[in-house]
Image (tube, rainbow, N blue to C red):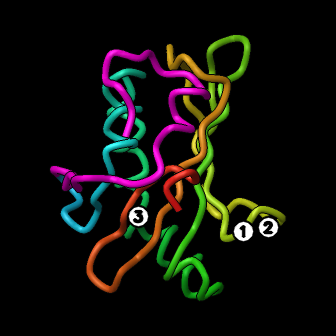
Amino acid sequence: MTNRNQKLSPESLRQFTGTTAYYRHSLNRKVVYTDAIKFVAEDGGAYWLIDAIARWIGSEAFRDAASKDERIREMHFWRLEVKEDRTAVLFAKADSPDEAFIIQSIPFTDFPLESIDVWAAYDGEHWTLYLPSEH
């Protein structure tokens, strides 16, 4: 856990090594997220990021990719990359060297980091979104 008075930075994110609570997504009830992801949403103004990932999980594109690569059914990796012009791209991969199976262009963001990785793991009931440092 980290001090809630800190601002979102790579350093503040590295302090998350576990969670004390899980938060259920309001629309996709199969998605829960950790204290660290809540910190990202609150301090980075990025609840939209959780919403975007939750919207993709279970979508037709997601199901199609999972039918072709069983790894996606258990775990996959999201990355948001923010460009200098404040546009961004959100994508999901089965693993780091693989091609993205979901790509979403973001026309504008004020997200304060250049990039962030969010991992998603399925426990048989829920998809848990968390930071790599929490693994």
Q: CA distance from mark 3 to mark 1?
A: 16 Å
Residue 114: give x, y in percent of width and height: 67, 24
Mark 2, Cα crowd under 10 Å, few <14 / some 14-19 / many 20+, is: few
Q: Secondary structure at mark 3?
A: loop
Of mark 3 and mark 1, the one earlier in the sequence is: 3
From the viewer's perspective, tell me whether residue 4 is left or right of residue 63.
left
Residue drawn at the location 57% of the way across and 38% of the way down: 14
Residue at image location 40% in from the left, 54% down from the top: 18
Q: Percent from the top left, x then y, of residue 66?
A: 55, 81
Circle 1: element type: loop
**Direction from residue 46 to residue 96 in the image, left or right:** right
How far separated are the C-alphas under marks 3 and 2?
18 Å
Q: Are marks 1 and 2 in contact (CB under 8 Å)?
A: yes
Which residue has dot 1 on it?
95
**Which residue in the structure is indicated by mark 3?**
57
Q: Nearer the viewer, residue 105 or 15?
A: 15
Q: Is residue 8 magenta?
A: yes
Which three-letter amino acid code belongs to the residue tagged 2? Asp
Placement of the N terminus among the 4 image quadrants: top left
Q: Which residues are magenta?
A: 1-26
Residue designated by label 2: 98
Amino acid of disc 3:
Ile
